[in-house]
Image (tube, rainbow, N blue to C red):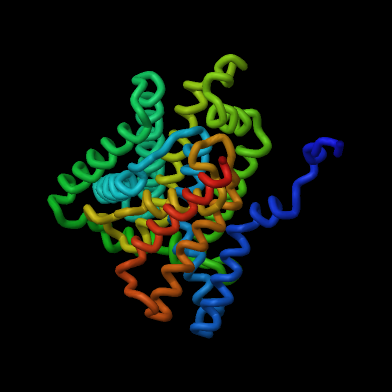
Protein backbone atom coordinates (compact mmCIF):
# COMPACT_ATOMS: atom_id res chain seq x y z
CA UNK A 1 0.00 0.00 0.00
CA UNK A 2 1.47 3.34 -1.03
CA UNK A 3 2.28 5.96 1.52
CA UNK A 4 -0.24 8.77 1.91
CA UNK A 5 0.51 12.02 0.09
CA UNK A 6 1.91 14.62 2.44
CA UNK A 7 1.44 18.38 2.37
CA UNK A 8 4.13 20.65 1.02
CA UNK A 9 6.77 21.69 3.48
CA UNK A 10 5.71 24.88 5.27
CA UNK A 11 7.50 27.92 3.95
CA UNK A 12 7.81 26.55 0.41
CA UNK A 13 5.58 28.10 -2.19
CA UNK A 14 4.79 26.04 -5.29
CA UNK A 15 5.99 27.50 -8.58
CA UNK A 16 2.40 27.76 -9.80
CA UNK A 17 1.43 29.80 -6.73
CA UNK A 18 4.38 32.12 -7.26
CA UNK A 19 3.43 32.68 -10.89
CA UNK A 20 -0.19 33.27 -9.80
CA UNK A 21 0.96 35.88 -7.28
CA UNK A 22 2.76 37.71 -10.08
CA UNK A 23 -0.32 37.51 -12.29
CA UNK A 24 -1.19 41.23 -12.18
CA UNK A 25 2.38 42.23 -13.03
CA UNK A 26 2.62 39.68 -15.84
CA UNK A 27 -0.73 40.89 -17.15
CA UNK A 28 0.48 44.48 -17.17
CA UNK A 29 3.68 43.52 -19.02
CA UNK A 30 1.67 41.55 -21.60
CA UNK A 31 -0.72 44.45 -22.09
CA UNK A 32 2.17 46.87 -22.58
CA UNK A 33 3.70 44.58 -25.21
CA UNK A 34 0.40 44.36 -27.09
CA UNK A 35 -0.12 48.13 -26.80
CA UNK A 36 3.34 48.78 -28.22
CA UNK A 37 2.66 46.47 -31.16
CA UNK A 38 -0.62 48.25 -31.85
CA UNK A 39 0.81 51.76 -31.52
CA UNK A 40 4.50 52.55 -31.17
CA UNK A 41 3.64 55.85 -29.46
CA UNK A 42 2.55 53.93 -26.37
CA UNK A 43 6.10 53.31 -25.20
CA UNK A 44 7.21 56.93 -25.43
CA UNK A 45 8.30 58.61 -22.21
CA UNK A 46 5.58 61.25 -22.52
CA UNK A 47 2.79 58.70 -22.87
CA UNK A 48 4.04 56.47 -20.05
CA UNK A 49 4.38 59.55 -17.85
CA UNK A 50 0.77 60.46 -18.64
CA UNK A 51 -0.38 56.93 -17.78
CA UNK A 52 1.34 57.02 -14.39
CA UNK A 53 0.01 60.50 -13.65
CA UNK A 54 -3.56 59.42 -14.46
CA UNK A 55 -3.05 56.28 -12.38
CA UNK A 56 -2.00 58.40 -9.40
CA UNK A 57 -5.57 59.60 -8.76
CA UNK A 58 -7.14 56.15 -8.68
CA UNK A 59 -4.04 54.49 -7.24
CA UNK A 60 -3.92 56.69 -4.13
CA UNK A 61 -7.62 56.06 -3.45
CA UNK A 62 -7.13 52.35 -4.15
CA UNK A 63 -4.37 52.12 -1.53
CA UNK A 64 -6.94 53.15 1.07
CA UNK A 65 -9.51 50.79 -0.47
CA UNK A 66 -7.01 47.95 -0.06
CA UNK A 67 -7.11 48.37 3.72
CA UNK A 68 -10.91 48.54 3.70
CA UNK A 69 -11.36 45.41 1.57
CA UNK A 70 -8.72 43.43 3.48
CA UNK A 71 -10.62 44.22 6.68
CA UNK A 72 -13.74 42.71 5.13
CA UNK A 73 -15.43 46.00 4.22
CA UNK A 74 -16.24 48.04 1.15
CA UNK A 75 -16.50 51.77 0.38
CA UNK A 76 -18.72 52.80 -2.51
CA UNK A 77 -18.61 56.51 -1.70
CA UNK A 78 -15.03 57.39 -2.70
CA UNK A 79 -15.97 58.98 -6.02
CA UNK A 80 -18.69 61.15 -4.50
CA UNK A 81 -16.45 62.02 -1.57
CA UNK A 82 -13.76 63.15 -4.01
CA UNK A 83 -16.21 65.57 -5.59
CA UNK A 84 -17.44 66.87 -2.23
CA UNK A 85 -13.90 67.39 -0.93
CA UNK A 86 -12.87 69.16 -4.14
CA UNK A 87 -15.87 71.46 -4.13
CA UNK A 88 -15.54 72.28 -0.42
CA UNK A 89 -11.82 72.89 -0.76
CA UNK A 90 -12.30 75.32 -3.64
CA UNK A 91 -15.06 77.25 -1.82
CA UNK A 92 -12.90 77.57 1.30
CA UNK A 93 -9.88 78.80 -0.65
CA UNK A 94 -11.92 81.32 -2.63
CA UNK A 95 -13.45 82.63 0.59
CA UNK A 96 -10.04 83.05 2.23
CA UNK A 97 -8.46 85.14 -0.55
CA UNK A 98 -9.58 88.52 0.89
CA UNK A 99 -8.01 87.74 4.28
CA UNK A 100 -5.05 85.48 3.46
CA UNK A 101 -4.36 86.56 -0.11
CA UNK A 102 -3.93 84.50 -3.27
CA UNK A 103 -0.82 82.63 -2.19
CA UNK A 104 0.29 79.44 -0.51
CA UNK A 105 -1.16 80.35 2.89
CA UNK A 106 -4.65 80.07 1.41
CA UNK A 107 -3.76 76.86 -0.44
CA UNK A 108 -2.34 75.21 2.69
CA UNK A 109 -5.51 76.01 4.66
CA UNK A 110 -7.55 74.55 1.80
CA UNK A 111 -5.43 71.40 1.83
CA UNK A 112 -5.89 71.00 5.59
CA UNK A 113 -9.63 71.47 5.12
CA UNK A 114 -9.65 68.71 2.48
CA UNK A 115 -7.76 66.32 4.75
CA UNK A 116 -10.12 67.10 7.64
CA UNK A 117 -13.23 66.41 5.53
CA UNK A 118 -11.77 63.16 4.23
CA UNK A 119 -10.82 61.97 7.70
CA UNK A 120 -14.20 62.98 9.15
CA UNK A 121 -16.02 61.04 6.42
CA UNK A 122 -13.88 57.99 7.19
CA UNK A 123 -14.62 58.23 10.91
CA UNK A 124 -18.32 58.60 10.12
CA UNK A 125 -18.32 55.49 7.93
CA UNK A 126 -16.36 53.44 10.43
CA UNK A 127 -18.54 54.50 13.35
CA UNK A 128 -21.82 53.77 11.56
CA UNK A 129 -20.51 50.36 10.47
CA UNK A 130 -19.09 49.28 13.84
CA UNK A 131 -21.14 51.01 16.52
CA UNK A 132 -24.26 51.37 14.39
CA UNK A 133 -23.92 47.76 13.18
CA UNK A 134 -24.88 48.63 9.62
CA UNK A 135 -23.43 46.78 6.66
CA UNK A 136 -20.58 48.67 4.91
CA UNK A 137 -22.39 48.35 1.59
CA UNK A 138 -25.48 50.12 2.95
CA UNK A 139 -23.57 52.86 4.77
CA UNK A 140 -21.34 53.81 1.86
CA UNK A 141 -24.13 53.43 -0.70
CA UNK A 142 -26.12 55.93 1.34
CA UNK A 143 -23.25 58.39 1.70
CA UNK A 144 -22.49 58.04 -2.01
CA UNK A 145 -25.86 59.61 -2.72
CA UNK A 146 -25.57 62.15 0.12
CA UNK A 147 -22.14 63.45 -0.90
CA UNK A 148 -23.12 63.75 -4.55
CA UNK A 149 -26.36 65.55 -3.68
CA UNK A 150 -24.58 68.01 -1.35
CA UNK A 151 -22.01 68.76 -4.05
CA UNK A 152 -24.78 69.31 -6.61
CA UNK A 153 -26.51 71.71 -4.23
CA UNK A 154 -23.26 73.56 -3.48
CA UNK A 155 -22.62 74.03 -7.19
CA UNK A 156 -26.29 74.62 -8.05
CA UNK A 157 -25.95 71.94 -10.68
CA UNK A 158 -23.04 73.72 -12.35
CA UNK A 159 -19.38 73.91 -11.46
CA UNK A 160 -17.35 75.47 -8.64
CA UNK A 161 -14.29 77.19 -10.05
CA UNK A 162 -11.06 78.12 -8.30
CA UNK A 163 -9.94 81.74 -8.49
CA UNK A 164 -7.72 82.15 -11.56
CA UNK A 165 -4.77 83.75 -9.78
CA UNK A 166 -4.88 81.19 -7.00
CA UNK A 167 -5.13 78.47 -9.64
CA UNK A 168 -1.92 79.70 -11.25
CA UNK A 169 -0.11 79.43 -7.92
CA UNK A 170 -1.59 75.98 -7.19
CA UNK A 171 -1.13 74.46 -10.67
CA UNK A 172 2.50 73.31 -10.20
CA UNK A 173 1.24 70.72 -7.69
CA UNK A 174 -0.14 68.83 -10.68
CA UNK A 175 1.79 70.18 -13.66
CA UNK A 176 5.15 70.60 -11.95
CA UNK A 177 7.95 68.09 -12.50
CA UNK A 178 10.96 66.81 -10.60
CA UNK A 179 13.70 64.94 -12.46
CA UNK A 180 11.41 64.87 -15.48
CA UNK A 181 8.50 63.15 -13.71
CA UNK A 182 5.21 64.86 -12.75
CA UNK A 183 4.79 65.47 -9.01
CA UNK A 184 1.59 63.33 -8.69
CA UNK A 185 3.68 60.25 -9.48
CA UNK A 186 5.89 60.95 -6.46
CA UNK A 187 2.86 61.35 -4.19
CA UNK A 188 1.44 58.08 -5.54
CA UNK A 189 4.73 56.30 -4.85
CA UNK A 190 4.97 57.78 -1.34
CA UNK A 191 1.40 56.77 -0.43
CA UNK A 192 1.92 53.25 -1.82
CA UNK A 193 5.22 52.83 0.05
CA UNK A 194 3.74 54.07 3.33
CA UNK A 195 0.66 51.88 2.83
CA UNK A 196 2.84 48.83 2.22
CA UNK A 197 4.90 49.50 5.32
CA UNK A 198 1.80 49.92 7.48
CA UNK A 199 0.13 46.80 6.13
CA UNK A 200 3.14 44.49 6.24
CA UNK A 201 5.38 45.89 8.96
CA UNK A 202 3.09 47.12 11.75
CA UNK A 203 0.86 45.54 14.36
CA UNK A 204 -2.09 47.48 12.99
CA UNK A 205 -1.53 45.95 9.54
CA UNK A 206 -1.62 42.47 11.06
CA UNK A 207 -4.81 43.38 12.91
CA UNK A 208 -6.46 44.53 9.68
CA UNK A 209 -5.73 41.16 8.08
CA UNK A 210 -6.84 39.29 11.19
CA UNK A 211 -10.18 41.15 11.30
CA UNK A 212 -10.77 40.43 7.64
CA UNK A 213 -9.89 36.74 8.04
CA UNK A 214 -12.18 36.10 11.00
CA UNK A 215 -13.60 38.98 12.99
CA UNK A 216 -14.85 36.79 15.82
CA UNK A 217 -11.49 35.10 16.31
CA UNK A 218 -9.84 38.51 16.26
CA UNK A 219 -12.11 39.63 19.08
CA UNK A 220 -11.19 36.54 21.10
CA UNK A 221 -7.54 37.46 20.53
CA UNK A 222 -8.19 40.83 22.22
CA UNK A 223 -8.01 42.84 18.99
CA UNK A 224 -9.92 46.13 19.16
CA UNK A 225 -12.01 45.36 16.09
CA UNK A 226 -14.04 48.56 16.35
CA UNK A 227 -10.93 50.74 16.52
CA UNK A 228 -9.25 48.86 13.68
CA UNK A 229 -12.24 49.30 11.37
CA UNK A 230 -12.74 52.98 12.17
CA UNK A 231 -9.06 53.67 11.52
CA UNK A 232 -9.25 51.69 8.28
CA UNK A 233 -12.08 53.84 6.93
CA UNK A 234 -10.25 56.94 8.16
CA UNK A 235 -7.23 55.91 6.08
CA UNK A 236 -9.56 55.54 3.10
CA UNK A 237 -10.93 59.04 3.65
CA UNK A 238 -7.45 60.52 3.93
CA UNK A 239 -6.40 58.79 0.71
CA UNK A 240 -9.41 60.30 -1.05
CA UNK A 241 -8.39 63.74 0.26
CA UNK A 242 -4.79 63.27 -0.89
CA UNK A 243 -5.96 62.32 -4.38
CA UNK A 244 -8.16 65.42 -4.39
CA UNK A 245 -5.19 67.65 -3.52
CA UNK A 246 -3.60 66.81 -6.86
CA UNK A 247 -6.90 66.67 -8.75
CA UNK A 248 -8.04 70.23 -8.01
CA UNK A 249 -5.04 72.00 -9.64
CA UNK A 250 -5.53 69.86 -12.74
CA UNK A 251 -8.89 71.37 -13.72
CA UNK A 252 -9.34 74.12 -11.15
CA UNK A 253 -13.00 73.25 -10.68
CA UNK A 254 -15.45 70.72 -9.28
CA UNK A 255 -18.87 69.69 -10.59
CA UNK A 256 -21.52 67.04 -9.85
CA UNK A 257 -19.67 64.71 -12.24
CA UNK A 258 -16.31 64.99 -10.43
CA UNK A 259 -15.07 61.57 -9.33
CA UNK A 260 -17.92 59.80 -11.11
CA UNK A 261 -17.36 56.00 -11.11
CA UNK A 262 -14.01 56.34 -9.34
CA UNK A 263 -15.27 53.81 -6.80
CA UNK A 264 -15.53 51.27 -9.61
CA UNK A 265 -11.96 51.95 -10.71
CA UNK A 266 -10.59 51.85 -7.16
CA UNK A 267 -12.27 48.53 -6.33
CA UNK A 268 -11.20 47.10 -9.68
CA UNK A 269 -7.58 48.10 -9.05
CA UNK A 270 -7.64 46.40 -5.63
CA UNK A 271 -9.08 43.09 -6.77
CA UNK A 272 -6.98 42.98 -9.94
CA UNK A 273 -3.97 43.39 -7.67
CA UNK A 274 -4.82 40.17 -5.85
CA UNK A 275 -6.62 41.37 -2.72
CA UNK A 276 -9.29 38.86 -1.74
CA UNK A 277 -12.83 40.22 -1.97
CA UNK A 278 -13.75 38.18 1.09
CA UNK A 279 -11.06 39.99 3.08
CA UNK A 280 -8.14 38.76 5.14
CA UNK A 281 -5.37 39.01 2.54
CA UNK A 282 -4.05 41.56 0.11
CA UNK A 283 -1.03 43.50 -1.09
CA UNK A 284 -0.38 47.14 -1.80
CA UNK A 285 2.04 46.54 -4.67
CA UNK A 286 -0.65 44.53 -6.42
CA UNK A 287 -3.07 47.43 -6.05
CA UNK A 288 -0.51 49.76 -7.60
CA UNK A 289 -0.12 47.41 -10.56
CA UNK A 290 -3.91 47.09 -10.81
CA UNK A 291 -4.34 50.87 -10.97
CA UNK A 292 -1.68 51.22 -13.65
CA UNK A 293 -3.16 48.32 -15.60
CA UNK A 294 -6.63 49.89 -15.61
CA UNK A 295 -5.31 53.23 -16.85
CA UNK A 296 -3.20 51.43 -19.44
CA UNK A 297 -6.34 49.77 -20.78
CA UNK A 298 -7.96 53.20 -21.08
CA UNK A 299 -4.85 54.57 -22.73
CA UNK A 300 -4.73 51.72 -25.25
CA UNK A 301 -8.39 52.33 -26.14
CA UNK A 302 -7.61 56.01 -26.76
CA UNK A 303 -4.55 55.24 -28.91
CA UNK A 304 -5.92 52.38 -30.99
CA UNK A 305 -9.71 52.84 -31.15
CA UNK A 306 -10.18 49.05 -31.01
CA UNK A 307 -13.48 49.69 -29.28
CA UNK A 308 -15.21 52.89 -28.29
CA UNK A 309 -13.57 54.78 -25.41
CA UNK A 310 -17.08 55.16 -23.99
CA UNK A 311 -17.00 51.44 -23.20
CA UNK A 312 -14.06 51.84 -20.82
CA UNK A 313 -16.31 51.48 -17.75
CA UNK A 314 -17.80 48.33 -19.29
CA UNK A 315 -14.30 46.86 -19.71
CA UNK A 316 -13.55 47.63 -16.06
CA UNK A 317 -16.81 45.99 -15.00
CA UNK A 318 -15.96 42.87 -16.99
CA UNK A 319 -12.51 42.77 -15.38
CA UNK A 320 -14.06 42.93 -11.90
CA UNK A 321 -16.47 40.08 -12.63
CA UNK A 322 -13.76 37.88 -14.20
CA UNK A 323 -11.29 38.42 -11.36
CA UNK A 324 -14.00 37.82 -8.77
CA UNK A 325 -14.87 34.55 -10.51
CA UNK A 326 -11.21 33.47 -10.49
CA UNK A 327 -10.91 34.34 -6.79
CA UNK A 328 -14.01 32.24 -6.14
CA UNK A 329 -12.35 29.34 -7.86
CA UNK A 330 -9.18 29.76 -5.78
CA UNK A 331 -11.12 29.92 -2.53
CA UNK A 332 -12.72 26.60 -3.30
Residue drawn at x 51%, y 62% as measured from the top left: 292
* Viewer-side residue, 12 vs 91: 12
Nearer to the camera, 198 or 23: 23
Farthest left residue in view: 156
Is residue 8 left or right of 182 when viewed as pictured?
A: right
Work out which quarter of the rendered image holds the N terminus and state it: top right
Q: Residue furthest bottom?
A: 40
Residue drawn at x 42%, y 81% is 304
* Vertical relation: 247 (above or below) 68: below
In the picture, measured across the screen, residue 300 lies left or right of residue 144, that is right
Give the answer, above or below, for where 119 lies relative to 261: above
The one nearer the camera, 99 or 59, is: 59
Question: Left or right: 152 with respect to 246?
Answer: left
Task: Give the x, y percent position of residue 197.
Answer: 64, 41
Observer able to see residue 200 = yes
**Residue 191 % position (x, y):** 55, 48
Residue 68 at what x, y percent from top left? 47, 37
Residue pushed farthest front? 1
Quadrant for the C terminus in the image: top right
User: Residue 150: image x %, image y %?
Assistant: 20, 42
Q: Compare residues 30 and 287 and report the one nearer the observer.
A: 30
At x 52% / y 70%, what residue is drawn?
49
Residue at 37% x, 49% y: name it.
263
Taking the image as drawn, is residue 169 in sight?
no
Up-down: is 1 above or below 21? Answer: above
Amino acid sequence: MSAPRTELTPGRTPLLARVSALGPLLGLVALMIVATLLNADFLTFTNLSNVLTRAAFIGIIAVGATFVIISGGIDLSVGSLTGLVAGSMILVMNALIPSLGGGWATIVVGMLCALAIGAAAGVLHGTLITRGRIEPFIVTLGTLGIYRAVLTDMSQGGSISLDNKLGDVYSPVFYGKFLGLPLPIYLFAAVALLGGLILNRTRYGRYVQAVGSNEQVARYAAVNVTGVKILTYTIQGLCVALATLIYVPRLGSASPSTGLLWELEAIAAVIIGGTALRGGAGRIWGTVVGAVLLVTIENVLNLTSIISVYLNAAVQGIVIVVVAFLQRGRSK
